[in-house]
Image (tube, rainbow, N blue to C red):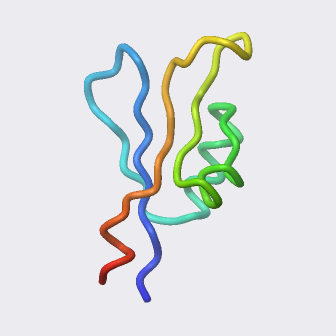
């Protein structure tokens, strides 16, 4: 089974970032402050500013499930 891919979006950034491995997603989570475990268990997680304002997010791309 192929490894899942992930997409990170951020407010004010017109181009989304696609990550090609779980390890890359986890490194981005550390840098950007979202919860990688939530992405893996629930499919997506928000990037929050001051713990309240959503400024972006990360989600797992579902197409890998069907390969």
Q: Give the percent coordinates (x, y) of residue 5.
A: 42, 62
Q: Quadrant location of residue 48?
A: top right
Looking at the image, which residue sits at the far left?
14
- Whether residue 67 is situated above or below residue 63 in the rendered picture: below
Residue at position x 61%, y 63% from top?
23
Image position of 22 (left or right of 61): right
Q: Quadrant location of residue 61?
A: bottom left
Looking at the image, which residue sits at the far bottom?
1
Residue at position x 44%, y 54% from top?
6
Residue at position x 27%, y 31% from top?
15
Residue placed most toward the observer, 40 or 28: 40
Residue placed most toward the observer, 61 or 31: 61
How many dots with numbers?
A: 0
Q: Give the percent coordinates (x, y) of residue 47.
A: 59, 28
Residue at position x 46%, y 56% from top?
60
- Whether residue 31 is situated above or below residue 41 in the rendered picture: above
Image position of 25 (left or right of 9): right
Specify the quadrant that holds the C terminus.
Answer: bottom left
Image position of 8 (left or right of 26): left
Specify the quadrant that holds the N terminus.
Answer: bottom left
- Whether residue 50 is situated above or below residue 31 in the rendered picture: above
Q: Give the percent coordinates (x, y) of residue 36.
A: 67, 50
């Amino acid at each position: 089974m192929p490894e899942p891919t992930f997409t990170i979006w951020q407010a004010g950034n017109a181009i989304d970032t696609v990550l090609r491995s779980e390890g890359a997603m986890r490194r981005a989570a550390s840098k950007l402050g979202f919860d990688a475990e939530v992405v893996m268990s629930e499919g997506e997680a928000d990037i929050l500013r001051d713990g309240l304002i959503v400024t972006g997010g990360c989600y797992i791309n579902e197409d890998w499930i069907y390969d």
